[in-house]
Image (tube, rainbow, N blue to C red):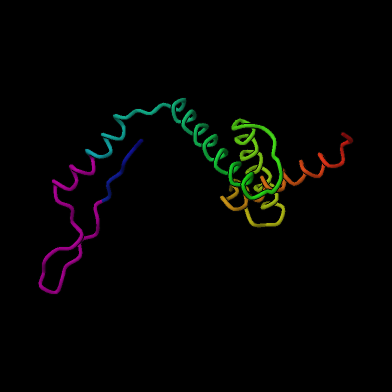
Amino acid sequence: MTLVLEKPRTLRTPTGSRIGERSKREQGCILARVQSLNDLNISKREENTMHWLGVVLIGLVIGAIAKLLMPGKDPGGFIVTILLGIAGSVVGTWIGRAVGLYHEGQAAGFIMSVAGALLILAIYHIMRRKRPA
């Protein structure tokens, strides 16, 4: 990561004092913060792992909310709930892009993800009723 410190334009107040200059101490604090971030040295693999952990946790929450909102008996345990939430987010993103709510590269928000999971559950309930016992 490259940090470029630009020298700010020096402005003067009506009394003649300068505005906008950074002191040596302030510049040192800025550089120290950047160096401490570089010292963390988070690898791409660790970053990718944290991303997927977040996807799983959000999928669990969205799937659980969809199961609470949809009446009737729903399938599976927590793994199916996670998969339902993740699939709901994918469906919500697809529908949002088709309608024009989201642009390329944008993911569905919380409400649209829950709506997508509810749609998947509704399709599941319709297919379960049609199947002979």
Along the line of sight, which residue is nearer the eye, 133 or 98? 133
Which quarter of the figure is the C terminus placed in?
top right
12 part of magenta stretch:
yes
- Where is residue 46 drawn, in percent x and y? 44, 26
- Where is residue 58 drawn, in percent x and y? 53, 40
Q: What residue span does the magenta drawing correspond to?
A: 7-31
Q: Which residue is outermost to the bottom?
A: 14
Q: How many marks?
A: 0
Query: Is 58 left, or right, of 132 in this rendering?
Result: left
**Residue that appears at 27% across and 50% down:** 6
- Where is residue 5 drawn, in percent x and y? 27, 46
- Where is residue 76 drawn, in percent x and y? 66, 32
Query: Is 131 left, or right, of 74 in this rendering?
Result: right
Q: Which residue is outermost to the right?
A: 132
Where residue 30 sits, quadrant-wise, is top left
Which quarter of the figure is the N terminus placed in?
top left
77 part of magenta stretch:
no
Along the line of sight, which residue is nearer the eye, 44 or 21? 44
**Residue that appears at 69% across and 39% down:** 74
**Residue that appears at 13% across and 46% down:** 25
Query: Is 133 left, or right, of 13 in this rendering?
Result: right
Residue 94 versus residue 54 in the image, above or below = below
Residue 6 versus residue 50 in the image, above or below = below
**Residue that appears at 68% across and 51% down:** 97
